Image: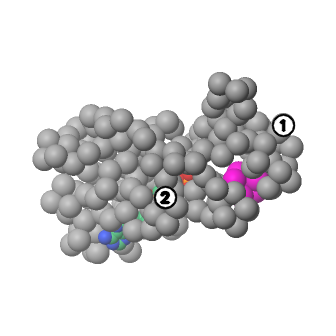
């Protein structure tokens, strides 16, 4: 997998904004499961199919999924990360998480998280990473001073909390109470 060029990162961000947060700003309506016709997205953003394909294929996190429907038309959606204000049901089956998952966050959030747990805030879900390196990358999006939390996902699932795994390997759940969290490490 080659890295995206600067221009492709820009396009990827625009697509993510439309497919996760503000479809109406581009004049688009997502279907119930978050899909839009690729042709409609291309027209709305003024980009070529080859540009879109390069962004989808070389995306470091496989943020977008493309699927061909019976009539031959390709549809696209974001695999996870939608705003709560966008009514999307990803329709993912419940999945058994591994015993332990991780969550990377700016260290300044620690006190609050350790008192009230992990909240989904503006998104549909709390996002959990399968390993520490991935959690560090997620946390570093927001700060150089990152804490990685260890989530007792197996115990949480046993207590009845539902988990889903997105097409690109992000674990999703609605909340994580503080008692299921431990500080794994910090990282400057
Ligand atoms: C924090 C990216 C204080 C939480 C990533 C996070 C992910 C609290 C922030 C995806 C809190 C929300 C999602 C509490 C949660 N007190 N802070 N009680 N509960 N927080 O962006 O997990 O690159 O909505 O720790 O890779 O950072 O865009 O969530 O720092 O998969 O494709 O509130 O977005 O994907 O931030 O990231 P976000 P996230 P992309």
> Could you say where residue 67 lies in the image, as x and y percent from the top left?
63, 31
Q: Is residue 14 magenta?
A: yes
Where in the figure is residue 51, as x and y percent of width and height? 82, 42
Tell me which numbered mark, 1 or 2, is placed earlier along the sequence: 1
Tell me if 57 is positioned left or right of 30 in this view.
Answer: right
- Circle 2 packing at 10 Å, graded few (<14), some (14-19), many (20+), is some
Residue 160, position in %: x, y?
Answer: 16, 46
Looking at the rendered image, the disc whose residue lies closer to the viewer, 1 or 2, is 2
Scheme of image coloration: one colour
Residue 80 is at least partly visible in this image: no
162 relative to 84, above or below: above
Q: Which residues are magenta?
A: 10-15
Q: Secondary structure at mark 1?
A: helix
Chief SS of the magenta region = helix
Query: Mark 1 highlights which residue?
Result: 50
Residue hosting label 2: 87
**Position above or below: 57 against 140:** above
Residue at image coords 65%, 24%: 70
């Amino acid at each position: 997998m080659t890295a995206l060029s600067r221009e492709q990162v820009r396009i990827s961000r625009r697509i993510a904004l439309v497919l996760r947060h503000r479809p109406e700003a581009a004049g688009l309506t997502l279907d119930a499961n978050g899909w839009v016709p690729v042709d409609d997205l291309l027209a709305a953003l003024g980009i070529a199919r080859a540009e879109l394909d390069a962004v989808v294929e070389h995306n470091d996190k496989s943020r977008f999924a493309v699927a061909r429907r019976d009539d031959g038309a390709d549809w696209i959606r974001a695999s996870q990360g939608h705003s709560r204000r966008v009514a999307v049901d990803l329709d993912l089956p419940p999945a058994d998480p591994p015993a332990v998952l991780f969550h990377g966050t700016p260290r300044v959030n620690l006190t609050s998280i350790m008192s009230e747990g992990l909240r989904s805030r503006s998104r549909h879900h709390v996002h959990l990473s399968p390993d520490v390196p991935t959690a560090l990358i997620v946390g570093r999006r927001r700060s150089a001073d990152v804490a990685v939390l260890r989530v007792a996902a197996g115990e949480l699932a046993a207590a009845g909390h539902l988990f889903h795994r997105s097409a690109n390997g992000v674990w999703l759940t609605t909340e994580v109470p503080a008692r299921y969290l431990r500080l794994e490490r910090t990282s400057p």
